[in-house]
Amino acid sequence: MKSKRIDAIDALRGVAMLWMTFFHLVFDLQTLGLWQQDVYRDPLWTTQRTLIVSLFLACAGMGQAVALAQQQSWARFWRRWLQIAACAALVSVGSWWMFPRSWIYFGVLHGLLLMLPLARWAGGWSTARLVALGGLAIASKWIAEYALSNWAGVDFVALLNAPGLNILGWITRKPVTEDYVPLFPWLGVVLWGVVAYRVLPWANCGWAPQVLARLGRWSLSYYMLHQPVLLGLLTAWVWLRQQGA
């Protein structure tokens, strides 16, 4: 069955992509020593990072809801999933080359590899059930953190904090990695994205700038290319400045 794009959702994804580009530009300027910011701890930047990831994952949930509504096949789903898996592997390799001590082993693409099949599988559930499960997924992070800090044994806490299981998100300390998008709480945002598609009139939305909508249709390609382009341009600029000094 031929799919029909929904411009408003694509445009919203395009907004997230431009916002992400700005955030990564600041990160790259900091990494190259061109603008001193603390993107790791300053609430100005950590809050933006949370909002950007939330917007991306909500759009991912809406995308799965659209796929279900248009009866897209599981075969098509798995073809896209394999593309994301390949890109996630490239992100891990590239980040290991640049940041060997804090390489990305479970960033946003890695998280989507778990969350998208779960969202597709749960997409047929009732809206009320999805709202409840999404809320539980989000709350579970803080419930687990409290329980681990107050009741759990040291060995069990260490087990959940280790890379093998910290992909769940039930941790007491954030791992040392450049991007970290665990299953909990972020699965809840994806499920609420499914709900958002159901309850909001996206197909009839008048707000859908075509430039943003076109950008939003190429999110994976853009995601993979924007950082190498930014870093390449900034590195070339630094080199040219040094040659002219």
Image (cartoon, rainbow, N blue to C red):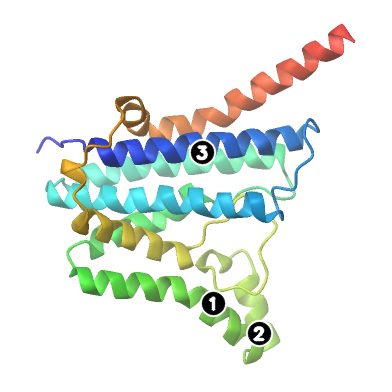
Q: Are marks 3 and 2 in contact (CB under 8 Å)?
A: no
Residue 29 seen by the camera: yes
- Quarter in which the C terminus is drawn: top right
What residue would you read off at disc 2? Answer: 149
Q: Which amino acid type is shown beneath numbered disc 2?
A: Ser
The spot of residue 176 in percent (x, y) is: 70, 57
The residue positioned farthest toward the front in the image shown: 206
The residue positioned farthest toward the top in the image shown: 244
Residue at (27% x, 57% y) in the render: 196
Closer mark to the observer between disc 3 and disc 1: 3
Q: Residues within 10 Å of mark 2 (few under 14, many from 20)?
A: some
> Which numbered marker is on residue 19?
3
The spot of residue 193 in percent (x, y) is: 32, 56
Circle 2 sits in a helix, a strand or a loop, which is it? helix
What residue would you read off at disc 1? Answer: 142
Task: Kindly report the distance in space between the C-alpha atoms of the residues bearing marks 2 and 1.
Answer: 10 Å
Circle 1 sits in a helix, a strand or a loop, which is it? helix
Closer mark to the observer between disc 2 and disc 1: 1
Q: Which amino acid type is shown beneath numbered disc 3?
A: Trp
The residue positioned farthest toward the left in the image shown: 1
Q: Is residue 38 above or below residue 182?
A: above
Q: Are marks 3 and 1 in contact (CB under 8 Å)?
A: no
Locate residue 191 relative to residue 241 in the image: left or right.
left
Residue at (62% x, 64% y) in the render: 163
Residue at (15% x, 37% y) in the render: 3
The spot of residue 95 in percent (x, y) is: 64, 41
Q: Residues within 10 Å of mark 1 (few under 14, many from 20)?
A: some
**Residue 200's quadrant in the figure?**
bottom left
Residue at (27% x, 39% y) in the render: 8
